[in-house]
Image (cartoon, helix red, strand yellow):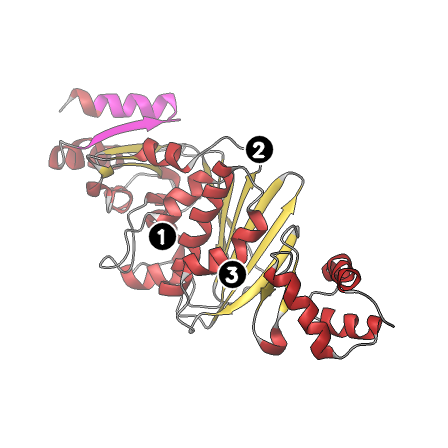
């Protein structure tokens, strides 16, 4: 069958969504041309920016820049650079988004991919972009050691659950010489929903609340799975989030800590050890907001360690509280009255 270049180009665009891996063979069969010539027509579409190529040689797949479901895998041992991966693969898919949402997607994707590259010790990373119901979701999954397990090992913690508390504070990293530890903190507050699944622990930050639960996915036997989702009509900006927690003089100076994470869900917050666990690393901030959501019982020792001992040792740190019960508020006021 003979046909012009424009007809073949239109055929490629129309059929690519259903044939991302075998479009060359399909074109060759449809128009009675060699695979080499069919590939040449595909290359023209790529050069014109109408098609995006992912992968190399036989593993190559092709997508339209307007695809609403786009995924690819990369070799983590191939000296990846997250900004180049963003520019080459992800940006063409989301360039139609509003500038503020595009900026958030770029920040989140590059920060989390960089974590996988530098910290996971894995062999591969899988990236998935989904656009549905007016929301964009970015998923990054590696096959490495697992984020909670790595922190547990670095800090000699009893359980991976304790790692979540330290991770949620911000400024924590297992490689302080090369990383600030800010990426997950800021990403989790830029997106509407931010989820981490690793070591059978599912950790979600959404609408100002952290949710921790036990989850098991067969395909997640090892590694780290991170999902970030935002409404494409969101008016939030990266600058807005940075300004809330950082400034030019002090840098990243403010954090919000979920107090509930400092103890097992079935245990009340009563001991100085629990308080000390909560306070680890908070001396690096100027402003600390303690969120008492889901904390229903505290003991005098726990409160005293925070609001008298720690505060006296770090008088330059401003400690405030949100969502505390009347009983907890009264206990804190009692400690303040004696200092």
Q: Are marks 1 and 2 in contact (CB under 8 Å)?
A: no
Residue where numbered disc 1 is placed: 162
* Visible residue check, residue 147: no
Q: Which residue is more in the foreground, 120 or 147? A: 120
> CA gap, disc 2 to disc 3?
26 Å
- Mark seen at residue 233: 2
Q: What residue sits 46% from the left and 73% below the top?
A: 123
Residue found farthest to the front: 4
* Visible residue check, residue 130: yes
- Mark seen at residue 141: 3
Ranked by sequence position, the earlier of labels 2 and 3 is 3
Residue 272 versus residue 219 in the image, above or below: above
The part of the image, by quadrant, that contains residue 322 is: top left
Residue 94 versus residue 118 in the image, above or below: above
Q: For marks 2 and 3, give the one nearer the viewer.
A: 2
* Element carrying mark 3: strand
Q: Which residue is more in the foreground, 8 or 234? A: 8
Residue found farthest to the right: 1
- For the record, the magenta segment spans 317-334
Q: Are marks 1 and 3 in contact (CB under 8 Å)?
A: no
Q: What residue sits 51% from the left and 61% below the top?
A: 141
Residue 211 versus residue 198 in the image, above or below: above
The part of the image, by quadrant, that contains residue 42 is: bottom right
Q: What residue sits 65% from the left and 50% below the top?
A: 66
Horizontal relation, residue 111 to residue 138: left or right: left
Image quarter where the N terminus lies is: bottom right
Task: Residue 292: give x, y in percent of width and height.
Answer: 38, 32
> CA gap, disc 1 to disc 3?
22 Å
């Amino acid at each position: 069958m003979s046909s012009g270049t424009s007809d073949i180009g239109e055929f490629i665009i129309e059929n690519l969504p259903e044939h991302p891996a075998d479009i060359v063979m399909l074109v060759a069969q449809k128009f009675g041309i060699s695979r080499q010539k069919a590939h040449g027509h595909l290359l023209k579409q790529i050069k014109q920016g109408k098609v995006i190529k992912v992968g190399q040689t036989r593993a190559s797949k092709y997508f339209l820049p307007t695809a609403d479901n786009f995924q690819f895998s990369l070799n983590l041992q191939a000296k990846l650079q997250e900004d180049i991966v963003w520019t080459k693969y992800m940006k063409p898919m989301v360039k139609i988004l509003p500038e503020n949402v595009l900026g958030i997607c770029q920040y989140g994707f590059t920060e989390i991919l960089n974590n996988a590259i530098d910290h996971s010790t894995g062999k591969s990373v899988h990236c998935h972009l989904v656009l549905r119901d007016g929301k964009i979701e970015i998923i990054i999954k590696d096959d490495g050691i697992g984020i909670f397990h790595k922190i547990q090992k670095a800090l000699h913690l009893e359980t991976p659950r304790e790692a979540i508390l330290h991770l949620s504070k911000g400024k924590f990293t297992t490689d302080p010489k090369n990383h600030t530890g800010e990426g997950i903190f800021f990403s989790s507050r830029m997106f509407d929903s931010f989820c981490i699944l690793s070591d059978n622990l599912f950790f979600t930050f959404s609408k100002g609340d952290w949710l921790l639960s036990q989850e098991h996915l067969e395909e997640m036997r090892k590694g780290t799975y991170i999902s970030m989702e935002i409404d494409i009509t969101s008016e939030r900006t990266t600058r807005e989030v940075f300004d809330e927690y950082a400034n030019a003089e002090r840098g990243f100076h403010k954090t919000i800590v979920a107090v509930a994470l400092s103890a097992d869900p079935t245990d009340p917050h009563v001991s100085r050890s629990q308080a000390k666990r909560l306070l680890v690393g908070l001396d690096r901030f100027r402003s600390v907001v303690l969120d008492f959501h889901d904390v229903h019982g505290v003991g005098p020792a726990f409160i005293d360690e925070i609001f008298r001992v720690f505060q006296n040792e770090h008088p330059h740190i401003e400690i405030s509280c949100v969502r505390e019960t009347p009983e907890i508020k009264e206990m804190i006021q009692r400690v303040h009255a004696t200092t």
